[in-house]
Amino acid sequence: MNKQELFSYIKDYSSIANKALGQNFLVDENVILKIVEALEIKKKDQILEIGAGLGSLSFFLSEKKSSLTLVDIDQRMSDFEKKLFANDKNVKVINRDILKVDLSKKNKIVGNLPYYLTSDILEYVLLNAIEATTMVFMVQKEAFNRLINPTTLETSPLSLLINYLFKKETILHVNKNAFIPRPKIDSTIFKLVRINSLNDEITSTYLLAKNLFKNKRKTILNNLALLLNNKEEASEILKASGYEIKTRPENLNFLDYLKINRILLINKQVIK
């Protein structure tokens, strides 16, 4: 099947998209080429695509002749991909929930992420794709603003982790007409290039931040006191960290949480 036949097939069978899985098939070749270009693919790369669907992006990725793993939770999509790439030895198809896939050996990850699972998928990828140096994702515009380009009030542990581990680059804003079926809002493609490695300390710091964000209306002091079940101890740790007790979770960056976490570890307080 050539690309014209593939795009024609996708348009003819767009009605099979599963709304519950957030399926929207990308059919704009110019947008696809921008994604492929952003990945800067080399032949030795180990690439993984999340939610490969009917293979519009996968088709162009496969032309690079690198190792390519396509993951989709929908059995129908995986069956189609297996037929589409039956003669391509570089392509492997996995029918599985991405949150249950081993990402540890992949150095480049790409995907059009469903809105309702954007945060869950990004968190899983960031904490498990330890060898990934480059990631290119397309998300709905609202999710992009919330996670990649948040205001102070929208800041979250996940946005802090992304900002610490990666250099961020906006690639392209994508009109909803680039998809079949057409979603309700536009999307944004962004690129993450690793600048810091993941290790146990970074992971535990992220878990600490998640705990201290559970009640965003409360101060860091009150959240830490709840976590330690000891307000006096929490106050002493914040004083040692150099932060005001009235500081709120969204006012700290990842390095601030890293500092607090190190003091907790010195005091033999392990956050899980």
Image (cartoon, rainbow, N blue to C red):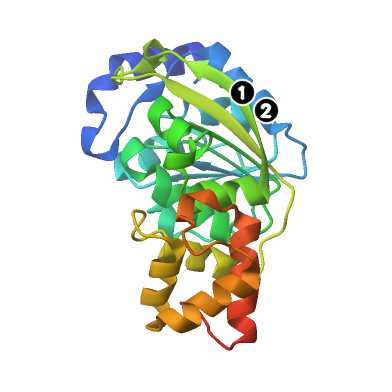
Q: In the rendered image, which residue does mark 2 sit on? A: 38
Q: Nearer the viewer, residue 154 or 225?
A: 225
Residue 94 in view in this figure = no
Quarter location, residue 114: top left
Distance (Cα) linking label 1 and label 2:
8 Å
Please state the horizontal and vertical placement of residue 261, each as a whole percent of the image.
Answer: 59, 72
Given the image, on which type of amino acid does mark 2 rest?
Ala
Looking at the image, tell me whether mark 1 or mark 2 is earlier in sequence order: 2
Determine contact: label 1, label 2, CB under 8 Å: yes
Residue at x 22% of width, y 38% of height: 20
Q: Tell me the amino acid under the disc marked 1.
A: Ile
Label 2 residue SS: helix
In percent of the image, x 49 and y 64: which residue is there?
245
The residue at the point 39 percent across, 68 percent down is 222
Q: Nearer the viewer, residue 175 or 240?
A: 240
- Classify 198 as above or below 153: below
Q: Which mark is residue 171?
A: 1
